[in-house]
Amino acid sequence: MKFNIPAACLLIGLVIAASVIVARPGASYSYQDRESSFAQTSKQHPAGTDALGRDRLVRVAASLLLGLTGALLASAATTAAAAGVGTLAAFGPASIGWSAMLVCDVFLALPWLFLLMMVRSAFPLTTSPEGSAAITFLVLAGLGWPACARAVYRGALRLKGAEWMLQARAQGLRRSQIIRSVIPNLIPLLLPQFIICVPAFIIAEANLGALGLGIGEPLPSWGGMLLELGNSATLLQTRWIYLPVVLLIVFLLLLETVAVEA
Amino acid sequence: MRRTPHLLICAAVLLTATITKTIAAQATTRLPGELVWTIGYDPKTFDPAKVDDQESELVRYLTAGVLLRFNRATQSVEPRLAEHWNVTPDGKTIVFKLREGLQFSDGSGLTSRDVAWSIRRVLLPAMGAPVAEEFLSPTVVTVEAPDARTVVVHLPQRVIGIGKVFDEIAIEPADRPSEGRVTAGPFVVADYRRSQYVRLRPNTHYAGRDSAGKQLPHASGIRLDILENPEQQIRLFQRGEYDLIDSIPPDYFELLKQTSGSAVRDLGPSLNTEQMWFNQASGAPIPAWEKSWFQNRAFRVAVSQAIHRADLARIAYQGHATPAYSFISPANGTWYNHQISAPHTDVAAAKISLASAGFHWNGSVLQDSSGHPVKFSILTNAGNAARLKMATLIQQDLGALGMQVNVVTLDFPALIERLMHTEDYEACLLGLENVDPDPNAMMNIWLSSSSNHQWNPSEKTPATEWEAEIDREMNRQASSVKDVERKQAVDRVQQIVADEQPFIYLVYPNVLVAVSSRLQGVQPAVLEPSLVWNVESLYLQGTR
């Protein structure tokens, strides 16, 4: 049974709902209503407020949009970089192919979490919250391409040995012409890589944020919101505190369903 | 296929190890009349001379016989093994007269020879005893024992608060260091199981007696369970497994209050402070115009006036913190300056102050006289929820002045690297733990030449006149023999700091404790160990 269409519909529905919540007049993810710390559900705050009196529903919706946008862009950058490196390695001279794959292996062997922490701590401190979000996803993209590049390299090698490729060469096509023909043939490989990277980057941002090293306050992020769950004493304050984690799980499941069946 | 059973076995072993560790402490049987509470980790040492961590220090406090004891409630020094003591007017010679008939826990006699040996031992450079540093020049300190009950200590120079130093020196049998197994204090180390517990038994030869003449200690023993999880600690306290909790995080305090309201107590402000400061170091790799803001008194005062400290205490600490305006807490009755005049929350006054210093507003954005928008970051350590909340609240408070503030959290090593080495930061929010109420212990922060003078470390000469005055006043309190003069000097430093705001003090976190209704004799104090400072007088109801 195919679940990808209902999952995609639900995903789109979530994104539309989040956009409406964030865009509605008076909605602010950063305004601190200091008299309403951990407020319960009300007309003004349908999902209550966080410890600083900020509207939880708006923050969750903004996290969803920010996480998805950042992950999509990072995934696009990763896939593009992987396509470039993988194709170049497969069709370039053997020494370039060997070196490119060695670099990939070295990247894959790095302890990425520590590397992320190191890179994150080297940010300029004056980076705005928006800048920190952009850099966080850029760093994730920068560290995410090697695995994808390896897959592309293998796919491109298979294409290189294909009969139509031999025929193209025999007919005297230039290398640039051949590569132009290769890219469309790699799309069935690149598309799943792109889709798989989206939830992976969302989880990576959440991990980094849960360590307190992700997107800067007051910009909402999955990781920043999950930090609230680290203190079991606050879990009893309101059941709405579980909203970010529940929504994140649902969101990731939907993304995975779409990715697996795509 | 063969891998699955191996994985299952590994998982089972790991699970068993975790569960075993978790329940080990609980599974230990409580002896009749035994007091039980927790410590966060294994003591690093039981040798009282080598103590340099909090849990080892607690074990030493509970077991050591000392010449003098610093009373945590009255904040005064009282004789213990010493019958009396006196210091010569120049502060260089201290004479102790021991009480008669003193004995160690093994029944052997305690004489001045044991005392002299114990003091000499902590002074040995090879021992690396942290307490030795408090003698300033430990290698030239000499100790004599002219008769069996007299001990004379000669110091090369006067040491402020020398009485309290002897609170940290355990008297052990000469030439027989026992790691707490033979002591002259109320308890003796009886058993230690790594990662499980430390068990202490009472010293039947202890010299102390209560007001009714009854032998101390009253409790039949102490068990310190090693448990680092505060949630589990609270759950076991609620079940009656533990008799006290000496430090409860504010969130858990509220949780415990809901179920065991009468057991929890907020003792008011601690000696610790949470503060923020701006980087004023001349060599810091930040733009010159930012340095000029940070070195501008009006700017710092305006920032201080814009911060709603009451909100920080109420929201970041659930109301269990006290707004702070000085480096000395009101809990430190002797040294707190009650007459201090400090900038309180007043956003309108802050705007006037900024305008008079040449700042102006372009729309809602604050700019300096050169047109640079006022924008900076506040650095704090990742993983401290209260500090992150405070920084985010301050971010909004300063937004009201038109300042754009970025909150940056870094892991501790990266933070320290920026603070202590590269000096590449603009503002920082951190806390300071003060265990010693005497301001002399803060010399390393206030002297401009010190590397811990955070806003401008290791100055060759004081960069400003007010820092030079702080240097003079701190040196005056350190060298004065008159307490009144010392107090005047420290009061003056508090006022200078309030006027100049090199550290913008935010809150004093409150001391939060829980005491079982069965535990008798408790007199909570703000100074550590706040609940068990009079451990020899504690007992469980119905067991005395």
Image: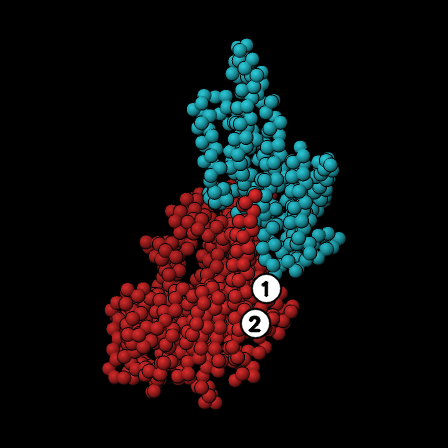
Chain colours: A cyan, B red
Q: Are marks 1 and 2 on the same chain?
A: yes
- Residue A39, compared with residue B146, is above or below; it is above
- Residue B151, compared with residue A148, is above or below; it is below
Left/right placement of residue B310 relative to residue B203 reads right
In the image, residue B5 lies at what x, y percent? 55, 49
Left/right placement of residue B71 relative to residue B476 reads right
Left/right placement of residue B112 relative to residue A169 reads left
Q: Secondary structure at mark 1?
A: helix
| Residue lying furthest bottom | B212
In the rendered structure, find residue B241 and report the number of the disc placed on it.
2
Read off the chain for label 1: B
- Residue B276, compared with residue A223, is above or below; it is below
For residue B455, which quarter of the picture?
bottom left
Give whichever of B26, B279 is nearer the camera: B26
- Residue at image location 57% in from the left, 16% down from the top: A163
| Residue lying furthest right | A43
Asked whether residue B362 appears in the rendered view, the answer is no
Which residue type does callout 1 highlight?
A: Tyr
- Residue at image location 60% in from the left, 70% down from the top: B238
In the image, residue B380 lies at what x, y percent? 50, 52
In the image, residue A166 lies at what x, y percent? 54, 15
Which residue type does callout 2 highlight?
A: Glu
- Residue at image location 58% in from the left, 40% down from the top: A201
